[in-house]
């Protein structure tokens, strides 16, 4: 997760990227939490919904990207903190976390199932832990990216770059139930209708393809982008209303018992 992030690029499809967060938040039943944390808050546009829903709460956004935090710092009512979502823990003197949210971040953390006990340990009794991750890693957008990355022209630079991955809903549900939580887990495939030239490339270049593109030197990156766009045009042919991008998402909302065992 050492590659940089571009808030402007990421926000090109802000409405479409925001829908899963809204759907996730809708299932969190917290009434009046005092302390809310968003791990991987990005530019803060979605974290602002936490501030709006719980205006009396202390809302903290955590991200490892200085560029993202600079943007998030402009959100009224939001505190920001630079931190690694793989190792973040609440400060010893901080109020207990009543709602812990991680939106589209743990797909970038290999072995993130092993983090669940520690993350749950940050949440107060009766509190909520909610996250969603993309579940489309076998989609043409990703498969073509990996195939092209393995091309001898690019392989020396792209070998070992970060690749997102996640699990099916039942895997997360079982892991959290083993920890004693009440779990609601589901999946949704959105059919995003995208417009403009090379819209699927525009979408993925702000997220899943970014580590690969960042690993390539400029002349090779231009060649890679040209080839990748051509492959995506064939895989996602525009229709009469635009280009449809199917996008599967995996959701988990879990509540801790009010008294720890």
Image: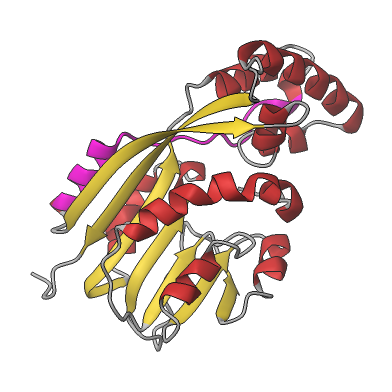
Query: Residue 242, relative to residue 192: is it above or below?
Result: above
Name of the residue lying farthest toward the right: 219
Which residue appears at 62% of the width and 13% of the height? Answer: 235
Query: Residue 162, relative to residue 130: is it above or below?
Result: above
Asked whether residue 23 appears in the rendered view, the answer is yes
- Quarter of the image for residue 152 reads top right
Residue 80, magenta (yes or no): no
Name of the residue lying farthest toward the left: 261
Q: Is residue 9 left or right of residue 100?
A: right
Which residue appears at 52% of the width and 36% of the height? Answer: 164
Q: How is the image coloured?
A: secondary structure
Q: How many marks?
A: 0
- Where's the C terminus, which quadrant? bottom left
Question: What is the x, y in percent for residue 169?
Answer: 28, 38
Name of the residue lying farthest toward the front: 240
Asked whether residue 88 appears in the rendered view, the answer is no
Residue 165, magenta (yes or no): yes
Of 23 and 145, nearer the camera is 23
Of 169 and 92, nearer the camera is 169
Of 257 and 178, nearer the camera is 257
Which residue appears at 37% of the width and 54% of the height? Answer: 24
Question: Which stretch did the figure color magenta?
Answer: 157-177
Query: Residue 199, relative to residue 169: is it above or below?
Result: above
Query: Residue 126, relative to residue 167: is it above or below?
Result: below
Question: What is the x, y in percent for residue 39?
Answer: 48, 62
Question: What is the x, y in percent for residue 159?
Answer: 66, 26
Question: What is the x, y in percent for residue 150?
Answer: 66, 15
């Amino acid at each position: 997760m050492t590659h940089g992030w571009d808030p402007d690029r990421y926000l090109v499809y802000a409405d479409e990227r925001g829908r899963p967060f809204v759907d996730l938040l809708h299932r969190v039943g917290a009434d009046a939490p005092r302390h809310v944390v968003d791990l991987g808050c990005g530019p803060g546009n979605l974290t602002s919904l936490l501030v709006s829903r719980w205006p009396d709460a202390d809302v903290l956004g955590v991200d490892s990207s200085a560029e993202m935090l600079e943007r998030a710092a402009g959100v009224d009512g939001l505190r920001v903190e630079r931190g690694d979502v793989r190792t973040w823990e609440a400060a010893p003197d901080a109020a207990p976390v009543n709602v812990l949210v991680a939106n589209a971040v743990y797909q970038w953390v290999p072995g993130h199932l092993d983090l669940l006990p520690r993350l749950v340990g940050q949440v107060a009794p009766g509190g909520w832990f909610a996250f969603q991750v993309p579940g489309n890693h076998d989609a043409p957008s990703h498969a073509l990216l990996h195939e092209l990355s393995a091309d001898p022209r690019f392989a020396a630079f792209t070998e070992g770059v970060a690749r997102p991955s996640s699990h099916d809903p039942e895997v997360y549900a079982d892991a959290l139930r083993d920890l004693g939580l009440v779990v609601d887990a589901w999946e949704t495939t959105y059919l995003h209708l995208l417009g403009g030239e090379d819209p699927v490339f525009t979408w993925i270049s702000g997220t899943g393809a970014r580590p690969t593109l960042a690993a390539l030197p400029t002349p090779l990156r231009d060649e890679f982008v040209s080839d990748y766009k051509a492959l995506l045009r064939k895989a996602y042919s525009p229709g009469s209303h635009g280009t449809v991008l199917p996008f599967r998402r995996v959701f988990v909302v879990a509540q801790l018992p009010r008294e720890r065992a």
